[in-house]
Amino acid sequence: MIMQIINNKGRILKYAIIIFFLNRLLTLEFLNYYPVMGEIYVLVSGILTVWYCFKFFYVHSRKNHLYVNEVGVVLLIAIYFTYAFFNTLFHDGSVRRVIMTAYPIIGSLCFIEVESRNHYDELIRGFNFFLVFFVIVNFWDMIFIRHALTGLTTTTFMVGGKNQLAVLLSVALAFYCVICQEQEKKQFFNLKSIAYLLVITMSAVLSTSSTCMITITAVILLYILMVVKKKGLLVNPTGVMIIYVVSWFALIVFRIHYLFADLLRNWFHKDLTLSHRTIIWDRALELIVKKPVFGYGLTESLNVFSVHHDYTGGNNNVWTALSGHNQFLQLLYYGGIVLMMMFFAIYFVSTKKKRRNNYHFKYYFLGVIGILINWMSEVPSEYAMFLMLGICYFSERSLWRSVENESELQINQCYRANIQGREIPR
């Protein structure tokens, strides 16, 4: 047993690193009760970030050329946060918050870029193992600690907020879909997979969050369509973003949901403000219009989007800390159109057409779709999105066998051999 652990120390180390780099994907509420553990957790994460950033530069300093197609996503996101840093500094905002947001994202991407060259398979298995573990832990917490089955409601669960839980569940489902395909399972519907699918679905239902339920339902339906259709469902990232931007304008600017007033009131028992969101969106839009190009930087003002609304028949103060309850609005507020253009550049470079030749790309992209849906009504930060875009970007390194298309396996092998300088397999 001891020898087995020693022989697998490389894999154990990777799992440990993944846990620290995924800490921004989760809300580990239990660490609040152990301040020392929380400080150690952040410290180790910071050390690993610095280590892999230096390792990233070391690896590429030994090359004669730095190919953008290999490290473009890391460089683009570094530029993204460099702009956010100086823009915030210029506006006398919270530069520390920019750094605290940037370091785990850039560190994670450097880690993925460096380790996935030789250990891509182990890396994805590590991510999946970690996510499955926390999905199950969160479900246990919901049932036996929060007693969600008794009808009690809460806004925060062990590993995620009520609405942001959709991010964890959709990303976990995306990674699990990839693992299922890697194991040459032509169908998702075996006993273990059905059980896991039920855990994810029940977690969404027990969250009592409309955002969470809509997100997970959409991701599950898309995956089922991919499995059922013989040639697979083609999900075009460009088309997805076009539809998303049109939907954003329809909901945020033109308030299309007013056309479904009866459905919202009678079926979902929602006020047309969508739990005050439309009022917060209006406030955000008012501010953005005043500084549309560069925005305001990352400010410390906790009352930026605070509003007063007569929601219960009296003067009800609706307060939200540094959140416009829509990620695009938040990005426009922080960095204006410039920051949004940088985000779109990262998105389209990470999902450009040639990368979609990898068979598993579409399953990773399910996680991106889930995050985008959540972004429509929440601000869970850029971490999960950039993590999934990074995985999409580097998915070409996958050597896993596709049981539906052997030619795609050869494409993956040729690409992997090319970046490692080996002879292309025959």
Image (tube, grey):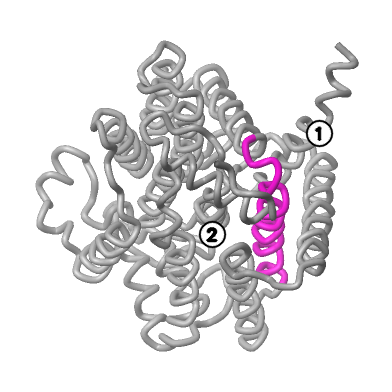
In screen coordinates, is 190 left or right of 142?
left
Please, is residue 416 above or below residue 67 in the view? above
Q: Which is more foreground, mark 1 or mark 2?
A: 1
Residue pointed to by mark 2: 382
Q: Which amino acid does label 1 sit on?
A: Gly
User: For numbered disc 2, what is the local secondary structure?
Assistant: loop
At 57% across and 55% down in the image, what residue appears?
A: 383
Residue for point 82% across, 66% down: 62
Badge 2 crowding class, 10 Å Cα cut-off, few under 14, some 14 to 19, many 20 or more, is some
Quick one: SS at disc 1?
helix
Q: In terms of depth relative to the viewer, which is nearer, 139 or 10?
A: 10
Where does residue 144 sit, x and y in percent of width and height? 55, 17
Marking on residue 40:
none
Is the residue 16 above or below the residue 22 in the image?
Answer: above
In this rendering, does residue 132 appear at all? yes
Q: Position of residue 206 (x, y in %)?
A: 40, 27
Type of amino acid under label 2? Glu
**Numbered tag placed on residue 10 in the rendering:** 1
Q: Which residue is drawn at 55% across and 49% down?
A: 414
Depicted 155 relative to depicted 281: above or below: above
Q: Does the magenta stretch include residue 108?
A: yes
Q: Specify whether residue 162 is in view.
A: no
Mark closest to the chain's N terminus, 1 or 2: 1
Magenta-span inclusion, residue 7: no
Q: What stretch is highlighted in magenta?
A: 96-121
Snapshot quadrant of residue 254: bottom left
* Residue 125 in the image, given as x and y percentages of width and height: 61, 32
Residue 58 on image: x %, y %: 83, 64
